[in-house]
Image: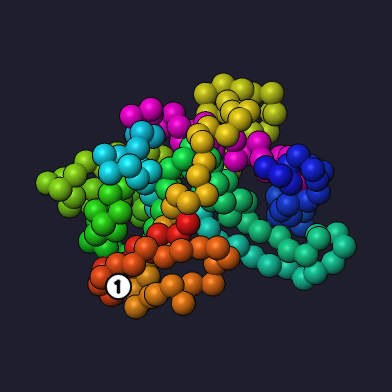
């Protein structure tokens, strides 16, 4: 948000819009996409889903989506260094948008089995799952949620695509395209912001995140059942 205010026209992303055609997104445009993601997530989760849990912790929104692939190209003045696939931009906006709601965002690797996804949803108490439209991840999410049926209810939502957050017609302000002008929730720097997962033994000395803290879990992660790591 700081960059969108003080350097709004500085390029944030450069991507290949079509073969041989590069397109830039500046910080102001990216922030519009983030705000659309915030509006989408607030609508999907609802006021009840955004409320703090009984223990006072922020709710968790998980993402199971094939949106993160990126490609680097050679550095030159025309591209400002690198080009990323547009789905990477969507994924980033989705993560930041969720943080702006006051929720904790949990990106889950699509390479996990349905048992591992169920395990991660249960361990983090995540009751909302954003899933990309591809059949493989729809089936993975469906199997994971069914396995959890006796433990807790998880609501599945279709994740937005690039055109939802960056519509061709900037004036379209209906439904998903509605932009929220302000931060949706009061954000606390001491709250957890994002969860990662690991198949190994982790401790705070292994995390190279400035001013981050690690919520210790008493068990080791495995490939079959990864361990969630909470980051502030």
> Seen from this angle, which residue lies furthest left?
150
Q: Which residues are magenta?
A: 25-48
- Horizontally, is 29 left or right of 165 in the view? right
Residue 133 visible (yes or no): no
Left or right: where does residue 23 sit relative to residue 45? right
Classify residue 94 as left or right of residue 138.
right
x and y percentages locating residue 84 in the rendered image: 66, 59
Q: Is residue 205 located in the magenta-colored stretch of the structure?
A: no
Q: Quadrant of residue 33?
A: top right
Quarter-of-image position of residue 181: top right
Quarter of the image that includes the N terminus: top right
Dividing the picture into quadrants, the one containing residue 123 is bottom left
Q: Residue at x 46, y 40 (%)?
A: 102
Q: Residue at x 73, y 52 (%)?
A: 12
Characterize the magenta stretch by its predominant secondary structure. helix
Image location (x, y in percent) of residue 85: 63, 56
Q: Pick whichever, 172 or 43, lies toward us.
A: 43
Q: Secondary structure at mark 1?
A: loop
On the image, numbered disc 1 is attached to which residue? 221
Q: Residue at x 15, y 48 (%)?
A: 151
Q: Is residue 96 above or below residue 199?
A: above
């Amino acid at each position: 948000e700081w960059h969108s205010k003080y350097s709004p026209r500085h390029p944030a992303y450069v991507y290949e819009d079509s073969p041989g055609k590069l397109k830039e997104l500046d910080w102001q445009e990216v922030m519009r996409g983030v705000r659309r993601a915030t509006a989408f997530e607030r609508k999907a989760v609802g006021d009840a889903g955004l409320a703090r849990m009984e223990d006072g912790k922020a709710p968790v929104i998980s993402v199971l989506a094939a949106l993160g692939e990126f490609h680097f190209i050679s550095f030159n003045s025309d591209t400002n260094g690198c080009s990323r696939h547009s789905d990477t931009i969507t994924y980033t906006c989705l993560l930041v948008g969720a943080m702006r709601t006051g929720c904790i965002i949990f990106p889950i690797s699509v390479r996990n089995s349905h048992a591992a996804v169920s395990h991660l949803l249960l361990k983090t108490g995540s009751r909302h799952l954003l899933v990309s439209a591809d059949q493989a991840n729809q089936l993975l999410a469906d199997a994971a949620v069914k396995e959890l049926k006796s433990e807790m209810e998880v609501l599945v939502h279709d994740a937005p695509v690039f055109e939802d957050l960056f519509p061709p017609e900037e004036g379209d302000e209906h439904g998903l395209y509605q932009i929220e002008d302000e931060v949706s929730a009061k954000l606390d720097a001491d709250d957890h912001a994002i969860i990662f997962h690991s198949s190994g033994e982790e401790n705070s000395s292994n995390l190279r995140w400035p001013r981050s803290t690690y919520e210790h879990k008493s068990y080791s992660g495995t490939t079959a059942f990864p361990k969630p790591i909470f980051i502030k």
